[in-house]
Image (spheres, helix red, strand yellow):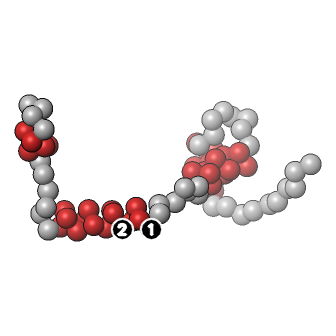
Amino acid sequence: MTATTTICIDPKVKDKLTALKHHSRESYSSVIERLTNLAIDEEPLSDEAIQGIEEALEDIKQGRLHSEEDILREFDLT
């Protein structure tokens, strides 16, 4: 049997949870479980991926960009 816990939430938050129900009889527990599953990243970015993103952002800041048109021309796709 599932344990029951009572929590205090703002009525506005309850209204938001109600709006997120897939059907009127869905429990708030199911809605909250769905939301927490969305919030938890089971496969976080690796340090290598984060470093690559940081390098790409620096390239953008430094103006080291190629337009779509440039790439299409370079690979003779126009």
| Residue 70 marker | none
Disc 1 and disc 2: Cα gap in Å?
A: 6 Å
Would residue 56 be found to the left or right of residue 76 on screen?
right
Q: Position of residue 67 (x, y in %)?
A: 12, 48
> Circle 2 — which element?
helix
Looking at the image, which is closer to me, 30 or 20?
30
Looking at the image, which is closer to me, 58 or 38?
58
Q: Residues within 10 Å of mark 2 (few under 14, many from 20)?
A: few
Q: Is residue 72 visible?
A: no
Residue 51 lies, with reference to residue 71, above or below; the image says below
Looking at the image, which is closer to me, 29 or 25?
29
Which amino acid type corresponds to the residue marked 1 in the rendered image? Asp
Residue 23 lies, with reference to residue 74, above or below; the image says above
> Could you tell me which residue is drawn at 44 percent across and 68 percent down?
47
Q: Are the two marked residues, 1 and 2, in contact with CB atoms closer than 8 angstroms?
A: yes
> Circle 1 — which element?
helix
Q: Is residue 9 visible?
A: yes
Q: Position of residue 24 (x, y in %)?
A: 68, 34
Residue placed furthest toward the front: 75
Would residue 36 be found to the left or right of residue 47 on screen?
right
Locate residue 77: give its quadrant: top left
Q: Position of residue 41 (x, y in %)?
A: 55, 56
| Residue 51 marker | 2
Q: Position of residue 28 (x, y in %)?
A: 71, 47
Would residue 63 be found to the left or right of residue 57 on screen?
left
Which amino acid type corresponds to the residue marked 2 in the rendered image? Gln
Q: Residues within 10 Å of mark 1 (few under 14, many from 20)?
A: few
Would residue 30 be found to the left or right of residue 63 on screen?
right
Residue under label 1, please give it: 47
Locate residue 23: give its quadrant: top right
> Could you tell me which residue is drawn at 8 percent across and 31 percent down?
78
